[in-house]
């Protein structure tokens, strides 16, 4: 139980989010993020972020 709680805590500190362009898991601490229609999207690289900004509709379901 103690181990499970600890891993949950660590998980919340290092939140993984998905890059909508390439599908990679990225940390939410990444400097590459962009808010669109009230939601924040995170990216692995400036290239993915630029790609999303060009055609956000393509990557939002
Ligand atoms: Zn990416």
Image (spheres, rainbow, N blue to C red):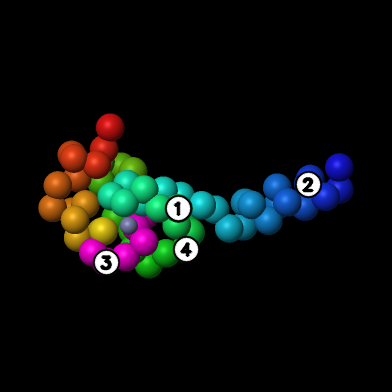
Residue 48 in the image, given as x and y percentages of width and height = 26, 58
Other residues around mark 1 within 10 Å, as few (<14) / some (14–19) / many (≥20): some
Residue at screen point 32% across, 46% down: 20
Residue 51 in the image, given as x and y percentages of width and height = 19, 56
Would you name the residue on which mark 2 appears? Answer: 5
Residue at screen point 40% across, 53% down: 24
Q: Nearer the viewer, residue 12 or 19?
A: 19
Check if mark 4's residue and mark 2's residue have beta carbons within 8 Å.
no
Of mark 2 and mark 3, the one earlier in the sequence is: 2
Residue at screen point 25% across, 46% down: 36
Extent of the magenta region: 42-47
Q: Which mark is residue 25?
A: 1
For the residue labelled by badge 1, is the local secondary structure a helix, a strand or a loop?
Answer: strand
Would you name the residue on which mark 3 appears? Answer: 46
From mark 4 to mark 2, how far is it between C-alphas?
22 Å
Residue 12 in the image, given as x and y percentages of width and height = 62, 51
Would you name the residue on which mark 4 appears? Answer: 29
């Amino acid at each position: 139980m103690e181990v499970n709680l600890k891993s949950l805590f660590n998980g919340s500190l290092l939140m993984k989010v998905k890059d909508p362009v390439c599908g990679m898991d990225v940390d939410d601490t990444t400097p590459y993020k962009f808010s669109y229609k009230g939601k924040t999207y995170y990216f692995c690289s400036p290239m993915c972020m630029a790609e999303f900004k060009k055609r956000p509709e393509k990557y939002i379901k």
